Image (tube, rainbow, N blue to C red):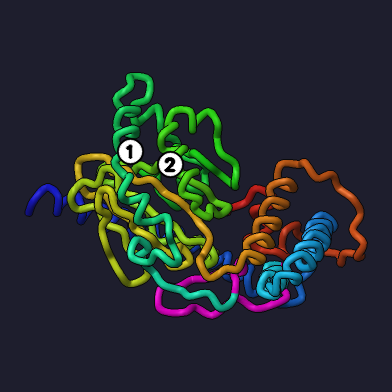
Amino acid sequence: MTQTTTIRNSLVLLLAYTALTYQAHAFRSGLRSLARCSALNVLTPRQLQFWEDVDDGLVDIEKFYESKGQSIGRVRTFCERAQGNLPLPEPASQGHQPSEEHIDGLTARAFWDVSDNAESFPWASILEEKANVIAEEFTQQLLRKEDTDSALFSGDSAWQSKVMGTGWSAFRLQRLGVWNVENCSKFPKTYDLLKELNIPMAVRGVCFARQTPGSGVAPHTDGRNFILTSHLGLKIPEGCWIKVGEEERSWSEGKLTTLDTSFEHSTGNPSSEDRHVLIIDFWHPELTEAERAGLEFIYDLRNSFESGEVPFRQPRAKPEPMEEEGQGLGGLWKALTGGEN
């Protein structure tokens, strides 16, 4: 038995144990999802304020895009489901685990071959052609004494440590639609290239991600079907793998591996070296311009609520009494209050 095989077997056992812990958490979350469509489907005053503000903003967006012949009906349905007024969507196939943050009617596919689809992803093949620019700048940065792997990368949250595992860490260039000026200054060529390509960046952002030797990410799903994620391979040791739904692949250096993270997915690095990729989140190509605008507004408002920029006001609707904050909104409201999203 080779050393790589031994490490991989150990990694599988580690992932299995971590997955059991995560599945227990997911089961509890599933019970809360069921409750959202029952008598517990009530909102706190702060939640009502949020959704009233969402509705006010969507009215203006709706009027603007009606003149262009575009509807935001699917975004309206998204809001109803996120508030618990509609049941969770049905999975499209085995391994698909959509959440209440869902846009109906979008193609659901575990892996996407974006570089061969210039119509839907005009930026993808160009990014692969110029991947050496990013890889060289990334390598140069790692060679700097003050920017070793340990200094450059850090975990984003306790939730990420629990789900992603302690071996996964990230260096953020963009998050929640905002570019990190200080971090981007370390990678000016990468930043300029990403901006030039006009990639339709979605709310989650852009980051360099490291997977340390002998570590892996447990099976999990991000739930949101309207965002796709591309991994640009930078340094990929032999044996590294990613599983999405029922399909397992590896990464290739200088190439994009693109997935729908509403499918259950996991990764592993059984090698003795770090694995590095650049992660880019972008809007699903079947969203209309109007739907992107609606979703961007909702998540921008969520960020404003989360940061405390929006002061409390009494909602126009009268809230029902409830025992526990947050029971009417699930995943989206947990994000508003700093929960596991």
Viewport quadrant of the C terminus = bottom right
Q: Amino acid at mark 2?
A: Leu
| Vertical placement of residue 99 versus 129, above or below | below
Queried whether the magenta region covers residue 225, the answer comes back as no
Q: Quadrant of residue 153?
A: top left
9 relative position to 116: left or right? left
Whether label 1 touches label 2, CB < 8 Å: yes
Queried whether the magenta region covers residue 102, the answer comes back as yes
Residue 193, which numbered label? 2
Q: CA distance from mark 1 to mark 2?
A: 9 Å
Find the magenta span and give its range.
83-103
300 relative position to 161: left or right? right
Which of 328/27 is in front? 328
Return the x and y of residue 263 as percentages of the image width and height. Answer: 44, 68
Q: Amino acid at mark 1?
A: Val
Which of 154/11 is in front? 154
Return the x and y of residue 39 as percentages of the image width and height. Answer: 76, 76
Return the x and y of residue 159 as percentages of the image width and height. Answer: 52, 48
| Vertical placement of residue 227 versus 139, above or below | below
- Residue at image mark 1: 133
Can residue 245 be seen here? The reply is yes
Residue positioned most to the top: 145
Viewport quadrant of the N terminus = bottom left
Q: Residue at x 63, y 70 (%)?
A: 33
58 relative position to 186: left or right? right
Residue positioned most to the front: 68
